[in-house]
């Protein structure tokens, strides 16, 4: 049996606000550093990116693809994200969907259909107005029953199936007469399975976790991912989705989640006023910002509380387990008291990855004694605390990431005068 990690939601250099390094070569390089074995290609609807996929990828005949001429042991699965916008009884619904295909030929057929609905060249994540999720599913399934559709970052306030500002109160409601084809959803960074288990209507769906990364660096790519285990000749497109949908713990082992507080929309808040609050605090304020009086952006925790019909701690039958981790570079940054993309932080992160093969191995497997031999004792302890879920994160809100609050005992003396490097999310 071979265990591998899969990040099945990424973006390419053809999407807005995405690093120009998000090409197949840098994705493969980033996957090796992170410890990922399977990646979504991202953005297959974009004509220029699809042309690159056709030229650079080689099918293995099982729904997986390899990068031609690359020694990297990384496979790709054809994936894109689509945005639909629809006015429903006066309420505008904006939902993002993940779409997967087993072949380039099927993607071509889908692109031929979708280009009649909107401009595929405008962005790697195309936007289709006057289109429902049900219509998108129907188009995909008419082309091939092997196409898979999964709601993306299900709770994000603005663009998701259950979002507070533009979503529905259930997945079934959002997909109408095509709801039977939806069998999983993506947790997103501001929620985790434990939160979602409180909503009984979600028991019918499997949960997957992906990075939605806009850059190929290990602190972004694979920050959320899925662990699968198959005999080598049984790792296929069809078997991966079969394991997900059936919640087969023999093959779908667990998901890797960031602490939900780390996500950009966990708390309610108003970033322009630097104000955030828990759902309980927001209720006392009538969901209004106390500084400017405007409506707060209602976060994921608040939205889950509104739909929850179970107490915290409930675990449904056949639940796939999860592990909570922050990226290694976040730990190094906090331990060194240096900016996340600073040279000092980058160099130490890269060094540990080189020594121990990949980041997920550092985070999940390397023994304490080996960590202490290779790095500062404080950082070794921070990695172990990350591994056992005992770190504290100040919650993100209204588009701002959460902030790791590492105890002073796990921090080194601050080095001054470091330059910052611009990066992408």
Image: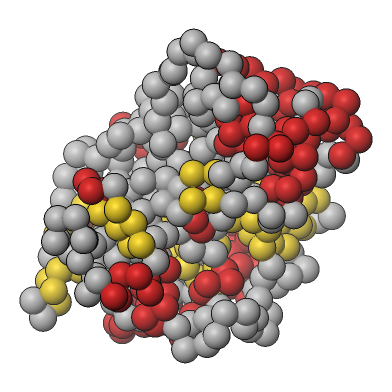
Q: Quadrant of residue 175?
A: bottom left
The residue lying at 14 percent from left, 61 percent from top is 294
Looking at the image, which residue sits at the far right?
369
Quadrant where the image shows the C terminus: top left
Front-most of residues 2 and 330: 330
Q: Quadrant of the N terminus?
A: bottom right
Q: Quadrant of residue 53?
A: top left
At 57% from the left and 69% from the top, the residue drawn is 193
Residue 219: x and y, percent?
Answer: 55, 35
Q: Residue at x 57, y 27 (%)?
A: 337
Across and down, in percent, residue 315 comes to: 65, 81
Q: Residue furthest left?
A: 90
Task: Using residue 195 as the reference point, say whether residue 358 is left or right of it.
Answer: right
Q: Is residue 339 visible?
A: yes
Residue at image location 47% in from the left, 68% down from the top: 185
- Image height check: is 313 above or below 208? below
Q: Nearer the viewer, residue 76 or 303?
A: 303
Whether residue 123 sits left or right of residue 350 in the image: it is left
Is residue 30 visible in the rendered image? The answer is no
Whether residue 35 is situated above or below residue 85 in the rendered picture:
above
- The image shows residue 107 at horizontal and vertical percentages of 38, 50
């Amino acid at each position: 049996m071979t265990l591998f990690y899969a990040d099945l939601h990424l973006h390419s250099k053809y999407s807005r606000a995405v690093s120009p390094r998000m090409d197949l070569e840098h994705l493969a390089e980033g996957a090796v550093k992170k410890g990922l074995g399977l990646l979504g290609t991202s953005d297959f609807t974009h004509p220029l990116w699809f042309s690159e996929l056709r030229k650079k990828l080689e099918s293995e005949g099982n729904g997986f693809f390899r990068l031609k001429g690359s020694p990297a042991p990384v496979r790709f699965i054809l994936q894109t994200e689509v945005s639909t916008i629809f006015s429903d009884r006066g309420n505008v619904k904006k939902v993002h969907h993940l779409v997967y295909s087993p072949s380039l030929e099927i993607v071509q057929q889908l692109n031929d259909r979708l280009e009649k609905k909107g401009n595929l060249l405008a962005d790697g994540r195309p936007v289709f107005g006057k289109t429902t999720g049900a219509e998108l599913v129907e188009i995909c399934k008419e082309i091939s029953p092997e196409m898979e559709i999964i709601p993306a970052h299900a709770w994000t306030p603005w663009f998701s199936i259950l979002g507070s500002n533009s979503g529905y109160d259930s997945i079934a409601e959002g997909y109408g007469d095509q709801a039977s084809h939806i069998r999983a959803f993506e947790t997103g960074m501001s929620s985790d399975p434990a939160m979602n288990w409180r909503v009984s209507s979600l028991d019918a769906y499997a949960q997957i976790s992906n990075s939605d990364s806009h850059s190929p660096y290990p602190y972004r790519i694979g920050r959320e991912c899925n662990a699968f285990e198959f005999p080598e000749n049984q790792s296929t497109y069809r078997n991966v989705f079969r394991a997900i949908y059936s919640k087969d713990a023999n093959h779908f082992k667990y998901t890797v989640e960031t602490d939900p507080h780390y996500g950009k929309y966990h708390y309610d808040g108003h970033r322009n006023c630097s104000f955030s609050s828990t759902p309980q605090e927001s209720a006392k304020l009538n969901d209004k910002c106390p500084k400017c009086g405007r409506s707060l952006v209602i976060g994921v925790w608040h939205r889950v509380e509104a739909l929850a019909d179970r107490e915290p701690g409930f675990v449904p039958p056949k639940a796939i387990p999860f592990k909570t981790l922050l990226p290694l570079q976040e730990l190094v940054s906090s331990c060194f008291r240096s900016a996340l993309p600073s040279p000092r932080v980058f160099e130490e992160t890269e060094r540990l990855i080189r020594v121990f093969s990949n980041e997920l191995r550092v985070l999940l497997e390397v023994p304490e004694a080996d960590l202490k031999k290779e790095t500062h004792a404080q950082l070794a302890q921070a990695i172990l605390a990350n591994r056992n879920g005992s770190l504290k994160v100040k919650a993100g809100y209204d588009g701002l990431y959460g902030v790791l609050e590492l105890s002073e005992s796990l921090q080194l003396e601050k080095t001054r005068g470091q330059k910052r490097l611009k990066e992408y999310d």
